[in-house]
Amino acid sequence: MRLRNSFWAVSIIVILGLFLSHCSDEHAEAKAEDPLAQRIWQNFHEVEGTAQYSEELDEATQIAQQQNMLAIAEKIPNGYPEPFLPYGSLKNKSLDISLGQKPILNAGIIALGKKLFFDQRLSFGKSHGFAAGKSCSSCHLEEKSFTDGEILSKGVEGDFTHRNSPTLFNAAYNSTLTWANPAFPLLEMQAKIPLFGDDPIELGLKGKEQDLLAFLLSSDSVYRDNLRSVFGLNYPEDFTKGAIDFTVITRALAAYERSLIRFDTRFDRFLQNTLPESEAFTPEERQGAELFYGFTSLKSGETLSCASCHAGVTTSNSFQYVRDGIYFNRKSFHNTGLYNVDGKGGYPEKNFGFANASQIDEHPEYMGRFRVPSLRFVGLTAPYGHDGSLASLEDVLDHYAAGGRSSLGPTGQNPFVDPLVKPGFKLTPDEKLSLVAFLRSLQ
């Protein structure tokens, strides 16, 4: 039933607001005293204005948002937006796909998702059967900020992934999941790729969905208890009736990943004016921030445009979130000139970017466009680039300074390189050190 301006609707919002006081009173903009922090906050607000779509949430959606926020509210600091949680409730269904299930985010489903995330029984190998020695955490290690430190990751059959494993921190704020597929806006949808995908084979579970559920539920009483408490389902009765399917796994995994929110880096604490004197930004970090955000120019006279793409509170110009009851969404894909394999703008096979081959035939300029990753924890998540081909932060800066790495090779600059990247720039050694120092403050 759709809620209108009734006494009960308002009352529920007020009651939930008491539980989320730090997400309402404290979500007023942080009062940063440092002038540099103030300028960065201003940048955040300007980026919010570049959203390609925004929508004021109706009362029913706001109530659902606040109900789900109870599980993660303490992780979101003063002045920061909230991830959008009641998916399937927006008017724009091309951005917000309904899965036909009520969104759930609470301690129970997060705990279930965490157990599944680290469970190596969630894999199948031809020579091993289930429990093939891989889990979601094999490619997203908690101690490596939910990356794996590898150029590409290896699946249960020895296949390498086509893309580098990105961090899962703040994935709930991404408007698209994966490096280059705009058709996957929900974590529940993305989870199916490593679980059931076959190009490459990662966890090897394609065609084994119901067998996997029977294997886990018959052998683990904790899973049976979780299934009952979270979804109200019983094994084996509901399994026999066909009421239990793989979506209980993807929904739980997505809930756990939505809870992986981290805005406690030195950079964030600098913005919140909570850094102790002993951890204050160094002159190098401050200079790096000034250069990164384009507040000051390089000694060459050029101005960097890093923050045009690594933008706003998420440090990515592909974002979705809620602030003050309004939903914001932006999707962006860019060709940074990493490759030009044929001298005509080509990228390696399986790494064409967001467009498929037929789209590129019609629009060759779509080649090589990938989502901009967040830079939080970037100092801990090497190697870099969609395919992990940039080994260090210094290599990343050299890549952009050249107007794209392909400019340094025999085929020359990619003809479809993003206009912001194309000119390149010239860094002094001190400027490079300062930029790297600032990037490392994002951890």
Image (cartoon, rainbow, N blue to C red):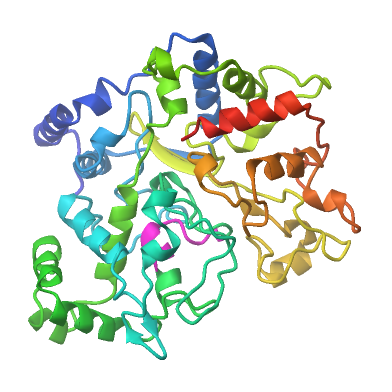
Q: Residue at x 38, y 86 (%)?
A: 207
Q: How many marks?
A: 0
Q: Is residue 300 something that shows in the picture?
A: yes
Q: Is residue 345 left or right of residue 91?
A: right
Decide whether residue 324 is among the magenta residues: no
- Could you tell whether 329 is left or right of 14 in the image? right
In the rendered image, the vertical position of residue 367 relative to residue 332, given as above or below:
below
50 to 3, vertically: above or below: above
Q: Position of residue 136 (x, y in %)?
A: 38, 65
Q: Is residue 259 above or below residue 340?
A: above
Residue 97 location (% of width, % of height): 40, 58
Q: Nearer the viewer, residue 92 or 257?
A: 257
Q: Which residues lie in the magenta part?
A: 181-191
Q: Main structural element of the magenta stretch: helix, strand or loop?
A: loop
In the foreground, 41 or 330: 41
Q: Residue, x 64% and y 41% (percent of image)?
A: 393
Q: Give residue 57's quadrant in the image.
A: top left
Which residue is at 31% across, 24% downward?
A: 27
Is residue 416 visible to the viewer in this orientation of the structure?
no
Residue at 46 percent across and 47 percent down: it is 174
